[in-house]
Image (tube, helix red, strand yellow):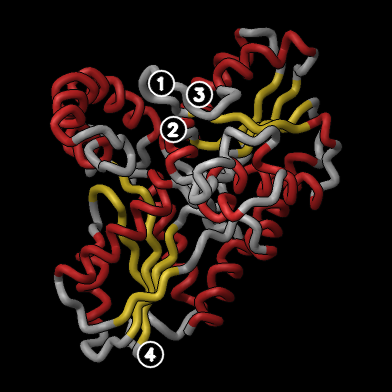
Amino acid sequence: MEAKSDKGIILMNLGSPDSTAVPDVKRYLNEFLMDKRVIDYPYLFRLMLIKGIIVPRRAPKSAEAYKSIWWEEGSPLIALTKQLQNAVQHDLQMPVEISMRYGNPSQEDAYDKLLQQNPNLKEVILLPLYPHYAMSSYETAVEHAKAVHKKKKYPFTLNIVPPYYSEPDYINALAESMRPYVSQEFDHLLFSYHGVPERHIRKGDITGKHCLQVEDCCHVGSPAHEFCYRHQVFITSELVAEKLKIPREKWSVTFQSRLGREEWLKPYTAATLEELPKKGVKRLLVACPAFVSDCLETLEEIAVEGKHTFINSGGDSFTMIPCLNVHPLWVGAVVKWMTAMS
């Protein structure tokens, strides 16, 4: 589109391999897992662990998983992010680009495209597509965007949208996207969030004495909550459940995608899916609010593997609720935020 503003927008998501070929998956996993905010071990140990053990073992399996969910137009996550880009740009009088923290299009690609559209660009508004603050998601995305901006000495300023896990527009969009599913008969709603190591939660505690140390820490007021992923996902879940009028006993929070052997946030989604049928839950709904766009972790890990686990454990019906993707209320929320910031 022809630039009509001295501002531009970048929607920043996680990323995806360029294809389902093992070399592309290896390249993607190496970039992702070598990020010091994802696996925060000392560099040499991280290098040996990731490139010597984890990636060689995981890449072929991950490639098969990607093949099972790959769309004709490519990666679902990237395709859905492009759809969001198009929908937002349609309603705004300023250019919108997308970037991926890992893989393509890169952050530099997005900056360059905005400048090509308007060489007089003065400000870029960056929306990380991570509603919650975590060292391994929102923080690494923002720090990477800042680092590229500084290194390349771009002539525009960077204005970054803070985490929006409790923003009314986000909560409303999430709740309304889920309403058609919770309006039907179900026994339980599971909010499954991407997990992080417990160590990351303690490491991010700015007080050094609250997270996972104080009883019921996420519901006891503390400055630590500003950077606490666990607290923030509970708040999102509580606000959505309240808006949908779901009784407390009919929903719960779990954490998926554990990597390695160290303790991650619990309860684990996989274990919970095995246990729920034994507690009388036969009709299950699963929502994944940490993901704005459907991706491998929702389309394969939950919709395929998770369903298999639940049904084989005695469940009768399993429904994964799609992510926000390009829901009209989500598009409207993004447009509203971008307009307010510009």
Tell which of 138 and 323 is nearer to you: 138
Question: Which residue position is annotated with label 4?
Answer: 5
Q: Which of the two labelled residues, at mark 2 and mark 4, occupies the earlier sequence position?
A: 4
**Residue pictured at 34% horizontal, 75% vertical:** 158
Amino acid on which disc 2 is placed: Arg
- Does residue 99 appear to the left or right of 56 in the view shown? right
Q: Amino acid at mark 4?
A: Ser
Q: Position of residue 25 (x, y in %)?
A: 22, 33
- State which mark lies toward you, 2 or 4: 2
Query: Who's the residue at 34% across and 44% down the image?
Result: 75
In front: mark 1 or mark 4? 1
CA gap, disc 1 to disc 2?
9 Å
- How far apart are labels 3 and 1 at the CA level? 25 Å
Q: Quadrant of residue 337?
A: bottom right
Q: Which residue corresponds to mark 2? A: 199
Q: Left or right of 268: which side holds 249?
A: right
- Name which residue type carries label 1: Glu
Tag of residue 304? 3
- Closer-to-camera residue (202/191): 202
* Label 1 close to label 2 by CB (< 8 Å): yes
Neighbourhood count class around disc 4 (C-alpha, 10 Å): few under 14, some 14–19, many 20 upward: some
Which of the two discs, 3 and 1, labels the residue nearer the N terminus?
1
In this view of the protein, which residue sits in the foreground, 80 or 111?
111
The residue that mark 1 highlights is 262
Measured as percent of width and height from the top left, residue 161 is found at: 47, 68
